[in-house]
Image (tube, rainbow, N blue to C red):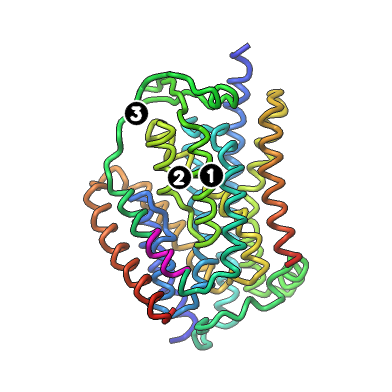
Amino acid sequence: MTLLVFLLCILAASYIAGLLGSVTGLGGGVVIIPFFTLVLDIDLRYAIGTSLITAIATSSGSAIAYVKEGITNIRLGMFLEIATTAGAICGAALAMYTPTHLISIIYGIVLIVSVSLSVRRHAGQSGDIITNKWAERFKLNSTYPDASGKLIPYAVHKVPGGFIVMWLAGILSGLLGIGSGALKVVAMDTMMKLPFKVSTTTSNFMIGVTAAASAGVYFYRGYINPTLSMPVVLGVLAGAYTGSNVLAKVSPQKLKIIFAVVVGLLALQMIYKGFTHSI
Amino acid sequence: MNKPPEIKNRDLQLTLGNLLRIGVILSALLVLAGGIIYIFQQGNGPRPQYVSFTGENSELLQLSDILKGMTRLQGASIIQFGLIVLIATPIARIVISAIGFALEKDYMYLVIAAIVLLIILVSLFSGVAG
């Protein structure tokens, strides 16, 4: 296999990963790590570095539209980023001392939990505007435009609990090179009771910053490889762009289930390889 | 009291959106250009293995070395610089938000943005030191 063929393989896989990742909301990285380690037999550390870059690209790429529409809660995002970035540094530091087979097992488990969370249907918003003293103190309550452009107010609940879950999401992000989008959305959705649109866009907005916090460590340690990152960044961006355009035409629930099954099988194999120390 | 800050908040959001767009496009173009040069330089060579982790070639870890490589039109250095632009985009976002909060005289959020920035900088410099 020449270098050119190798790069084209990665480009094609990344395009599909970006497409499915954007349609299902899981991000492209969840496919990149298993594809690199299981199919191309690349060391897990290179896979993690590349995946982290993917998380930043997808987050910044898809945040563009949402920020302009005024759905993202910038104050809430900024507030919670204290927790996610602090967590990300802890995670990146842990990654340097954790053996790869153990990381592989943790990754597999997190992947299975993430896909199961993404398949579940979203609980409706509580709708009550009972104010939380933390939300009030930090001016987190806000409004978002509905389909007709009318501004709907919402309140943020359980701020300290959400903050702690965000810290954990940050650790996983730094340790595994993922965006931890599923965990962030669940925390905002079910604990903090944000409207679905606000939680997904704000979580997406935070992913880039969280990943940037650990990317510095990874970059200087040589985890971020230009040969591998090049086709992945271009492929995932193109795929995510296509995905955001076809989103309206496909049934996301059906696609989500197919994707969840594929990712679940990959995750099981990562766990198996971790236990047999063959990764 | 509520009206003027909301208008500024809207401006802030538009600036953030544009910043993200510029950062992503610039980095994608750099990665693409570097990638094409890289393929011309080594495309017919064998597939690199990456079976075991060796750490990156030290020429690709420090910004000063990467810039030097770019002046020699090294494909890998250009890609790496594109990746740095990509990583810098969300960090620049925090700086712009901080300026926005300062304009709105929202000092609490100015401090919060500064804390986030400080955490990221600590990460960057601990990476250099370690």
- Considering depth in this image, is A216 or A276 the residue closer to the camera? A276
In-image side of A126 versus A106 (left or right): left
Which numbered disc flags the more N-terminal residue, 2 or 1?
2
Task: Check residue B40 for magenta coloring.
Answer: no
Residue A42 position within the rendered picture, expressed as x and y whole percent measured from the top left: 47, 78
* Crowd tier of the residue under label 3, counting other residues whose Cα lies within 10 Å: few below 14, some 14–19, many 20 or above: some
- For label 1, count other residues whose C-alpha is less than 10 Å away and answer few (under 14), some (14-19) or many (20+): many
Residue drawn 23% across and 46% down?
A251
The residue indicated by pointer 2 is A184
**Residue at 54% across, 33% down:** A76
What element does badge 2 sit on?
A: helix
**Residue type for callout 3:** Gln
| Three-letter amino acid code of the residue under disc 2 | Lys
Toward which corner of the image does residue B95 lie, by quadrant?
A: top right
Say which quadrant the C terminus of chain A sits in.
Answer: bottom left
Q: Which residue is mark 3?
A: A125
